[in-house]
Image (cartoon, rainbow, N blue to C red):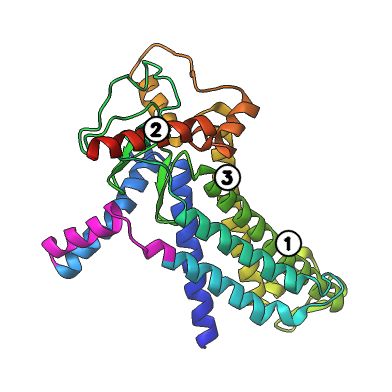
């Protein structure tokens, strides 16, 4: 009984996570259409529920903490999903290995891949995105020309009072200006910007690989059950009536006799498709020399009827990839400017 409840709870968590990932990856909350309306409704639901449970004032405070401030809620959910999913795999899939479909090396390989994913997640959580907080960090991140379209020279953040380099944006969640700002990711509880975008992409790629690997292993184990029991040659009974084996009948049989394995296959396949789609979305942005923030800016500009303009930050696919993998703010010239500005600040302070 407890195992069935655990399966149901984890599947519900996987479904919620898949829906959240889809909304973050594919839906612009400020946009038009039914999906945007659904996204806005879902984003507003926690506050409505909290207001109903704990009162308007406390509910608003709790909602502000959950939605507008850095918090570990989705980090804890992530650990539950990964730990719970791997635990169920150990309980149901590991005893079947080795078998005709999977060799004994898949046990340590799966563990190594899970640990690698946890490592990329920890790195994405801890790596600073590139905050602009003073003249020294401005000098370090002042690496792009103002295009006069999305970014105007001489801009200062009205909230923090610091100058904003081109492609930077004030993050409403972290309350700081982030260089080449992309978005804030609640799964890593961190802003994604110039200096940690590469780690965020590695985080997505590793988890897409893990989920694809999990789905493939579950499918192969189910295939092994079919072959070992010769289900495609078996005769099934619906009541007293014999039923010839077909793919549909065999799938129905597996759904009833191998529930956990089928659930793991479904969860890995669905979440893997969502994460892979999100990764593909970001790789497309890299290909085009854009950030998520700039993508939405260009869309709003087009909807507003503005004249088309060239993206001066699109340097071609290979150079765009280099901008992500080797950020300009980590190159020697930027680090030298940062040291010079920091020394000047110290001298003025002395």
Of the residues under marks 3 and 2, which one precedes in the sequence? Answer: 3
Residue beneath label 1, please? Answer: 216
Between 138 and 235, which is closer to the camera in this rendering?
A: 138
The residue at which mark 2 appears reads as 340
Residue depicted at x 35% and y 41%: 29
State the quadrant of the C terminus. top left
- Number of numbered callouts drawn: 3
Instruction: Tell which residue pokes out farthest to the bottom in this image.
Output: 1
Mark 1 or mark 3, whichever is nearer to me: 3
Bin the neighbour count of mark 1 within 10 Å (Cα to Cα): few under 14, some 14-19, many 20 and up: some
Q: Mark 2 and mark 1: span between their CA atoms?
A: 53 Å
Q: Which mark is first along the chain, 1 or 2?
A: 1
Q: Residue at coordinates 40% horizontally, 56% vertically from top-left?
A: 189
Kindly tell me whether residue 293 is visible in this rendering.
no
Q: Is residue 253 magenta?
A: no
**Magenta span of residues:** 55-75
Relative to 176, residue 116 above or below: below
- Residue 198's x, y, as percent? 55, 44
Between marks 2 and 1 in the image, the one whose residue lies nearer the viewer: 2
Estimate the x, y position of residue 79 in percent, counting from the top left.
49, 68
User: How far separated are the C-alphas under marks 1 and 3?
Assistant: 19 Å
Q: Residues within 10 Å of mark 2 (few under 14, many from 20)?
A: some
Residue hosting label 3: 279
Taking the image as drawn, is residue 323 in sight?
A: yes
Q: Position of residue 287 (x, y in %)?
A: 59, 30
Q: Earlier in the sequence, mark 1 or mark 3?
A: 1
Q: Is residue 263 above or below residue 195?
A: below
């Amino acid at each position: 009984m407890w195992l069935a409840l655990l399966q149901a709870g984890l599947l519900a968590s996987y479904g919620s996570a898949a829906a959240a990932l889809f909304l973050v990856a594919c839906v612009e909350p400020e946009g038009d259409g039914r999906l945007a309306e659904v996204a806005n409704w879902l984003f507003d639901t926690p506050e409505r529920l909290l207001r109903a449970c704990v009162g308007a004032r406390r509910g608003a405070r709790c909602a502000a903490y959950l939605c507008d401030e850095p918090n570990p809620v989705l980090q804890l959910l992530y650990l539950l999903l990964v730990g719970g999913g791997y635990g169920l795999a150990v309980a149901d899939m590991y005893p079947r290995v080795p078998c005709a479909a999977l060799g004994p090396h898949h046990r340590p390989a799966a563990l190594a891949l899970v640990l690698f994913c946890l490592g990329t997640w920890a790195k994405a959580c801890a790596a600073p995105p590139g905050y602009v907080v003073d003249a020294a960090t401005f000098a370090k991140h002042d690496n792009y020309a103002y295009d006069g379209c999305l970014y105007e020279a001489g801009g200062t953040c009205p909230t923090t009072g610091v100058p904003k380099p081109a492609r930077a944006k004030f993050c409403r969640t972290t309350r700081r200006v982030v260089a080449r700002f992309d978005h804030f990711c609640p799964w890593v509880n961190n802003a994604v910007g110039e200096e940690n975008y590469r780690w965020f992409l590695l985080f997505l790629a590793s988890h897409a690989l893990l989920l694809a690997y999990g789905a493939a292993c579950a499918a192969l184990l189910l295939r092994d059950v079919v072959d070992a029991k010769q289900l495609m040659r078996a005769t099934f009974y619906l009541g007293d009536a014999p039923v010839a084996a077909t793919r549909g009948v065999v799938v129905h049989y597996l759904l009833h006799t191998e529930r956990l394995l089928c659930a793991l296959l479904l969860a890995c396949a669905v979440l893997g498709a969502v994460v892979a789609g999100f990764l593909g979305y970001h790789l497309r942005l890299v290909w085009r020399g854009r950030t998520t923030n700039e993508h939405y800016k260009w869309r709003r500009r087009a909807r507003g009827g503005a004249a088309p303009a060239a993206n001066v930050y699109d340097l071609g696919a290979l150079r765009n990839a280099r901008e992500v993998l080797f950020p300009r703010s980590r190159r020697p010239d930027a680090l030298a400017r940062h040291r010079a500005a920091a020394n000047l600040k110290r001298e003025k302070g002395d």
